[in-house]
Image (cartoon, grey):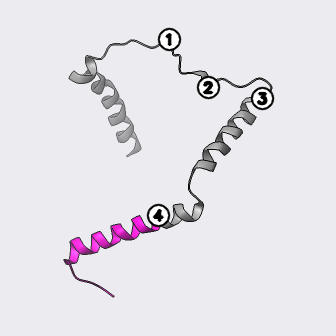
Amino acid sequence: MIGVVALCGIVCALIVPRLLPLSRIEDTYTIENSDRDHETIPEGKTLFTHSLHKAVQKADKSPSFLTFLRDGLKKYFGYVDWDITCRYGNRHYV
């Protein structure tokens, strides 16, 4: 079974780039990019410490874990309600 999936993946990888919209895209690459200043590591920091600092900055901007959990549960129960409504009509269950 895994071999069939792998074979299909290889066949698709050979065919898809030759399809019409993708075959018209030029094979050019951008060498100079002026927006790469955010990727430079500051003087006196290692890659790990700089990455950790950026990750903490990103985490400070994110919502709290409880907000994340509450929003996820709202979405989950919304899907369950939608599924029940689709299967059984617009009946209310207690």
Q: Residue at x 67, y 45 (%)?
A: 56
Q: Which residue is mark 2?
A: 39
Q: Earlier in the sequence, mark 3 or mark 2?
A: 2
From the viewer's perspective, is 19 left or right of 9?
A: left
Q: Neighbour class for label 2 at 10 Å: few (<14), some, many (≥20)?
A: few
Q: Which residue is mark 4?
A: 71
Q: Residue at x 50, y 67 (%)?
A: 70
The stretch of residues the image draws in magenta is: 71-94
Q: Earlier in the sequence, mark 4 or mark 1?
A: 1
Q: Which residue is mark 3?
A: 45
Spatial distance from mark 4 to mark 3, Cα to Cα?
37 Å
Spatial distance from mark 1 to mark 3, Cα to Cα?
26 Å
Q: Neighbour class for label 1 at 10 Å: few (<14), some, many (≥20)?
A: few
- SS category of the residue bearing label 2: helix
Front residue of 64 and 18: 64
- SS category of the residue bearing label 3: loop
Spatial distance from mark 4 to mark 1, Cα to Cα?
42 Å
Q: Amino acid at mark 4?
A: Asp
